[in-house]
Structure formats: C-alpha cells, structure tokens
Image (cartoon, grey):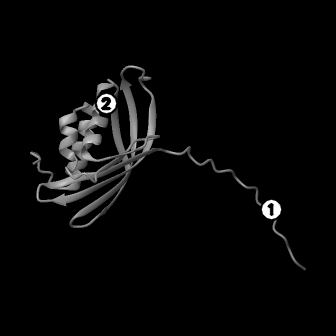
Amino acid sequence: MKKTLFATPQDAEAAFYDALQNADLDAMMEVWSEDDEVSCIHPDGARISGIEQLRENWAQIFKSGQRLQVQLTDQLVISGPMFSLHSLHENILVLGGPGAAAGARSIVVTTNAYVRSSGGWRMVLHHASHSPAPVVRREVPLEAPKVLH
C-alpha cells in the first residue's frame, strides 16, 4: 500500500513534477496507482502500460542523468468526485546531463489523469507530446469594397 496520501489531484500532480525534477524514482512511483492499467506516453515514445514497465521506464529516464526544470502553464482541469483530467503545457528547461544541451527549452502538451481511491488521489495516465510549431498568421489584404449601382 502507498504511504503518501494525496488529498487532491493537484497534490498528486505537484508530487509528480517534484519527482520528475528531482529524478526521484520512489517519489515518482508514490504518485502512480498500483493498478496494472496505468499508462504513460512520453514525447515520440511508445505507450508504456502496467506498473512494472512504468517503474522500469522511469528508472531508465532518471539514470540517464538528464535534469529538467518544468513550469506548468495553460492548465485546464475537468474534475469530478472520483476522476480528474488535467490538460496543460509543460515548459521544460534542460538543466544538463549526459548528451543534454543545457539551456534547451521545449513546450510539451500534456494530459494527466487521476483517480480517487481509499489511499487518496493517484495518477493513472501521463500522455506528453511535443507542441506543434506556433501558428503563424498571415495578414490577408482586404479588397476594396465593391459598390453596386
């Protein structure tokens, strides 16, 4: 049974990003439901399903030595008594690590899903995708008004 009680989905989300930034596997796994139906998709990655695959994946990521700073923006939360869905942008700054370009920045579009159980709120889905390039709007010249006689 999990030790940490997350009273709200926001508490679980804050713990998820703290664990991510600190590369703390034990703290990361505290956030996740122990259910085998958990799922995680990293940018450009395959879907990882099941708690054991999830643990192995996060362990591999944290062992890489790459460290991130993440700021959350544009949050949209749809929540009910037993389920909470969060859509947001992760503004990521690479702090360093092997093969990492320190100072590199990216925006990741993310969906996090949480369920409420007797042990508090737990993550069941983390889906992250690279943000598409911003839309460049072109100004369309207006035509001269047509006058009918």
Q: Point out the image quarter for the C terminus.
A: bottom right
Question: Which three-letter amino acid code belongs to the residue tagged 1?
Answer: Glu
Residue 29, placed above or below residue 102: below
Judging depth in this view, the residue of 73 and 42 nearest the camera is 42
Work out how far the residue at label 2 is from the one at label 1, CA to CA, in angstroms: 58 Å
* Residue that numbered label 1 is attached to: 143
Question: Which three-letter amino acid code belongs to the residue tagged 2?
Answer: Gln
| Residue at x-position 22% and y-position 34% | 25
| Residue at x-position 28% and y-position 47% | 50
> Percent x, y for residue 74?
39, 51
> Percent x, y for residue 55?
25, 38
Q: Which mark is residue 85?
A: none
> Percent x, y for residue 114?
26, 56
Decide: few, some or many residues near mark 1? Use Cα within 10 Å; few <14, some 14-19, many ≥20. Answer: few
Q: Which mark is residue 60?
A: 2
Residue 36, placed above or below residue 145: above
| Residue at x-position 56% and y-position 43% | 133
